[in-house]
Amino acid sequence: MKKRTAQRVDSVSEGGFARFLSLAHSLGKEGLISLSVGEPDFKTPWHICEAAIEAMKKGFTGYTPTSGYPELRSAVARYLENRYGIRYNPETEIVITVGSSQAMDLAFRATVDPGDEVILSDPYYLCYPSCISLAHGIPVTVTTRGDDGFKLRPDHVEAKLTPKTKVILLGYPANPTGTEMSREELAEIAKVAEKHDLLVISDEVYNRLTYGIDHTCFASLPGMKERTILLDGFSKAYAMTGWRLGFAAGPADIIAAMTKIHQHTMLSPSSVAQYAAIEALKAGEDDIQQMVAEYDRRRKVLVKGLNDIGLTCHEPKGAFYAFPSVKVTGLTSDEFVEKVLLEEKVLILPGSLFGAQGEGFVRICYAYSLPHIEEALRRLTRFVQRHRKS
């Protein structure tokens, strides 16, 4: 038979996480501690749920405008102006999407032609290269280092540029490293984008989850609104992962192209989820502050505990991930994760899933209760004591 699947699918990673999930399933759930999935352990605040319920009661259960309800686009525009001082026209410069993941897919498909190169840091969120490849682009990775906090440096970016480079992809605060970039550091990346006339796709879905540092929206930097597609969503900040709602803001011509693709592939985002999002933007600030305070408490306990047992970990300044080195054990990332799962029933992720520079590290999510984190640290302590290189 002829090959029935498209060639572009061959470039998509299988997702090595599935192997560890299968192994964990074979062990059974009893006694298992999972610090693997990047999902808030908080429930969606009830006033947000009530807004969706009220929308259903009023019959708002049908199709919506492709770009999203005007009320939500206006609320997003007000939010971005109030928080970052950036003015977007809600009619032409904002589109509501089915999660920020769809916003990213639309952004690449609307801007990348076959053979165009996209610069991204390594380690990276594991879906980034696949999204680029599915748009027929070519991912080009830039090495970042643990001893430098996994920060993207402008001279390293410039060294990877070619005449085919079209986009720089940023993701701060970062998954998997928890790295956040300062305004001054991002401004240096902005100079590279302007000098070489590059677009920037800035994934800022973790922008509200920062600790001791104010988040800088890349589009707020001088001259960057005109060349930046800002991606954000409601999943992380408002504990709304299952509602699947995000948005993109950017230049009108690019948003129009994204909306055109959106119309033919997804048609429209959920009606009731949009009413929930309007409520989240209107009255969800206290919810965010409470969740961030708890994440910060867990972050401090986890990072201190990891460093105390010899798993050297830089201080994550954003998101809810720690990315410690496991080199003290002499094990590869995959070996460490498999052995600690089998011996101690702790499920975490190997850094190798997130790029070549992730080898020798593991990702640990602290969007879980403090008792779970403390018990995981006790088990990790036993494990490292047994496997530490002499």
Image: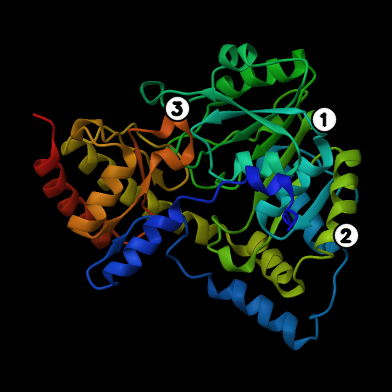
**Residue 209 location (% of width, % of height):** 49, 47
Sequence-first tag of 2 and 3: 3
Q: Which of these two is toward me, 217 or 284? A: 217
Residue at image coords 54%, 75%: 46
Whether residue 78 is visible to the viewer of this picture, yes or no, is: no
Q: Secondary structure at mark 2?
A: helix
Up the image or down, 208 lies above or below 360; here it is below
Q: Quadrant of residue 34?
A: bottom left
Q: In the image, residue 348 lies at what x, y percent? A: 34, 52
**Residue bearing mark 3:** 150
Q: Which residue is mark 2?
A: 264
Q: Mark 2 or 1 closer to N-term?
A: 1
Q: Secondary structure at mark 3?
A: loop
- Of all residues shown, which one is farthest toward the front? 1
The residue at the point 83 percent across, 79 percent down is 62
Using the image, determine if residue 377 lies above or below residue 204. below
- Cα–Cα gap, marks 1 and 3: 27 Å
In the rendered image, the quadrant that contains the N terminus is: bottom right
Q: Quadrant of residue 321?
A: top left
Q: Is residue 254 above or below residue 288?
A: above
Visible residue check, residue 214: yes
The three-letter amino acid code for the residue at tag 2 is: His
Sequence-wise, which precedes: disc 1 or disc 3? 3
